[in-house]
Amino acid sequence: MKLLFTRGTGFQRLYIHSASLLPTISIHIVPAPPIASAIYPEDLFAPVSVLNVETETPLTGMGKYNIVVFGGDHCGPEVTAEAIKVLRVVEKKRSDIEFNFQDHLLGGASIDAAGTALTDEALNAAKSADAVILGAVGGPKWGTGAVRPEQGILRLRKEMGTFGNLRPCNFAAPSLVDISPLKADVCRSVDFNIIRELTGGIYFGARREDDGDGYALDTEPYSRAEIERIVRLAGHLAMQHNPPLPVWSLDKANVLATSRLWRKVVTEILDKEFPQVKYGHHLVDSAAMLMIKDPRKLNGIVVTSNLFGDIISDEASVIPGSLGLLPSASLSGIPDGKSRVNGIYEPIHGSAPDISGKGIVNPIAAILSAAMLLQYSLNRPAEANAIETAVRNVIESGVRTGDIGGKATTKEVGDAVAAELEKIL
């Protein structure tokens, strides 16, 4: 286990990449931001705060996996049910895989049952699991209360140390280019993966609310260590391909000091640790235009900060034509196959209260999220690829929900993918 301490003026920060305690511990001291006490006030972090733990527990020989399932709110349980259905096929066809699914409440469902968006019991289960499947949370019922569903997700991410968010932008099946809002000749063959830094930046910086004087403040803190680990994740993912995929870093280095540090660290890490990887820098506003004009120029790995990643990934999600097609993963470490990497796997769509309970929600994003779980947390790439192939075959056969031009129900799509996967495996 690697413990990363940051020492600053008046307090310390402790970065941990998993909650597990291992016999061997290496401690790394890294410099804190020069205005640490201002950027990280005491009400945001305790004198020693736990952000992250990086485990080195080997994966070999492990075939029994504990998976925490947060169905969440509205349509969330509908789509997670189909993801689990598909994973059960993997379990059936692979004698060395056994899943133990544990259901827990998150978001509005947890607020209704326990008065909090995430109970300590559910959090501890998630932290000790091999991976987490999440449906969707939120809804108008809980939107304005003091306790809100989104607080549960933020706490879950922080406590699990999921610093890297992965959002693929591609077409689950070739014929889906016809439903994209972009012209087919513009978006055909688009295939990039947005790697968003998830636990630093402006969402976690000091802020000052308007107290009546007409002035408010948000700060965008980033340390070298935070940037290094997300760039290493991007570099690792690029190296999983032959030849390695290019890496495109998005920043605002012409204006922001944090972006200049970002660009400097990206350049240093990729040059020194990933010399085989070609890379380039884009200003984020320029990249936003390029994503619509000629998105194939971003094919590869796109790495960026929390705020920019939040915005640019939502823009990218429009390209495939439906939010119901797009999975995501939030990882607590680098999935190198040598150690377990806990993660949160979820479709990028919301809880869709207007259509939940009608059996018409597209489960493909949740099913593909399960494929990402196999790929990144369980180191089972063959089974992950098989799910992706099954999804592609089912969509091409015409079994689709209404959002992508079909008439099938949520369950019918899940059944079709499960049946196709059984043939493939």
Image (cartoon, rainbow, N blue to C red):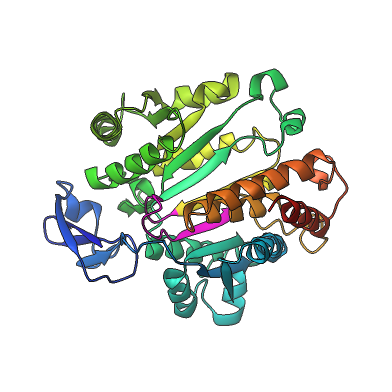
169, 336: nearer the viewer? 336
Say which quadrant the N terminus sits in.
Answer: bottom left
Left or right of 63, for residue 244: left
Magenta span includes 346? yes
Q: Is residue 19 magenta?
A: no
Which segment did they paint magenta? 331-347
Q: Is residue 215 visible?
A: no
**Up/down of 294 relative to 229, above or below:** above
What residue appears at the point 37 percent right and 59 percent down from the top-left corner?
161
Q: Position of residue 103 (x, y in %)?
A: 60, 75
Front residue of 349/382: it is 382
Left or right: 88 as drawn, with respect to 248 = right
Residue 286 locus on image (x, y percent): 46, 22
Against 82, residue 324 (above or below) is: above
On the image, the x and y values in percent for residue 394 come to 78, 45
Q: Where 199 falls versus 317 (above or below)? A: below
- Name, please, the residue furthest toward the right: 407
